[in-house]
């Protein structure tokens, strides 16, 4: 059974869809403020399917992500009491204090690093608003951090992807099951 090769072919087909850019923009916006799936899952196949458009895809992803981050910032600022009560009564008081400490220590650098890292960016956007971080430095750090990440991802995939695609297709079933095993291991060990 060729499970992952069929999924791969479908993803590449969807990446060429005429509305794919709208979906990429919507996903990028939503992920920065409330949605759990990162835009890389669309950015990468779109950059592979249409490598000549990688720069456009990265720019769209960056702009939409920063705009979504601004929404997350305002969610944190407007819902201060509600969010704080959820964080403290929901058992997240220690993590919230830790995030506050990171922002107190690193300030805008925490947002820049979060924008570039795989850490859920929405946690930093909402926390930045919750802690009333200065808005303009927040936006600038978001643009730099997210932009670096998305331009590196899209550019790398566009440049190396077409050359690596035959190898990826050759080993896709093994790679797919390896990823599933890795995810299951992470889930099991985070529950312990």
Image (cartoon, rainbow, N blue to C red):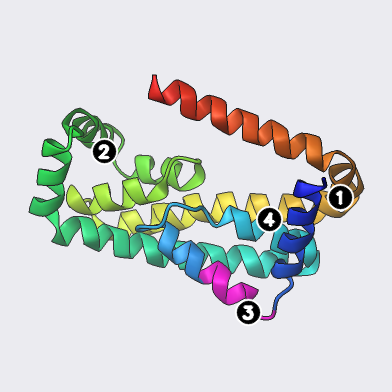
Residue beneath disc 3: 19
Closer to the eye: label 4 or 3:
3
Residues packed near mark 4 inside 10 Å, few (<14), some (14 to 19) or many (20 plus): many
Is most of the magenta stretch helix, strand or loop? helix
Point out residue 25 in the picture as x, y percentages from the top left corner.
Answer: 52, 70
Do labels 2 and 1 touch, CB within 8 Å? no
Q: Position of residue 49 (x, y in %)?
A: 78, 64
**Secondary structure state at the residue bearing disc 3:** loop
Distance from the alpha carbon under mark 2 to that under mark 1: 41 Å
What span is in magenta?
18-25
Looking at the image, residue 49 lies above or below residue 118: below
| Cα–Cα gap, marks 1 and 3 | 24 Å
Q: In 3D space, how far apart are the residues under numbered discs 1 and 4 (Cα atoms)?
A: 12 Å
Residue denoted by label 2: 103
Of the residues under marks 3 and 2, which one precedes in the sequence? Answer: 3
Local secondary structure at mark 2:
helix
In the image, is residue 131 above or below residue 191? below
Indicate the quadrant where residue 87 lies: top left
Mark 1 lies on a secondary structure that is helix
Residue at position x 35%, y 57% in the image: 34
Does residue 25 appear to the left or right of 129 in the view shown? right
Q: Report how far apart the C-alphas of labels 3 and 2 lie in the structure.
A: 38 Å
Which residue is disc 1 drawn over?
165
Nearest to the observer: residue 99 or residue 30:
30
**Relative to residue 130, is residue 171 drawn left or right?**
right
Residue behind mark 4: 44
Considering the image in quadrants, where does the N terminus appear? top right
Image spot of residue 26 (x, y percent): 49, 70
**Callout in the foreground (2, 4):** 4
Q: Nearer the viewer, mark 3 or mark 2?
A: 3
Residue 136 highlighted magenta (yes or no): no
């Amino acid at each position: 059974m060729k499970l992952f090769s069929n999924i791969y072919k479908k993803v590449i087909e969807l990446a060429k869809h005429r509305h794919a850019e709208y979906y990429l923009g919507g996903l990028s916006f939503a992920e920065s403020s409330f949605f759990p799936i990162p835009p890389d899952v669309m950015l990468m196949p779109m950059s592979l399917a249409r490598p000549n458009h990688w720069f456009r895809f990265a720019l769209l992803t960056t702009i939409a992500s920063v705009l979504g981050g601004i929404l997350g910032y305002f969610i944190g600022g407007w819902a201060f009491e509600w969010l704080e009560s959820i964080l403290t009564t929901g058992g997240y008081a220690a993590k919230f204090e830790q995030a506050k400490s990171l922002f107190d220590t690193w300030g805008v650098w925490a947002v820049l690093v979060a924008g570039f890292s795989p850490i859920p960016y929405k946690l930093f956007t909402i926390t930045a608003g919750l802690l009333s971080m200065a808005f303009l430095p927040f936006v600038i750090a978001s643009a730099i951090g997210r932009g670096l990440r998305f331009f590196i991802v899209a550019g790398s995939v566009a440049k190396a992807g077409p050359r690596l695609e035959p190898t990826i297709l050759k080993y896709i079933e093994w790679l797919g099951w390896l990823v599933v095993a890795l995810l299951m291991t992470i889930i099991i060990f985070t529950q312990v």
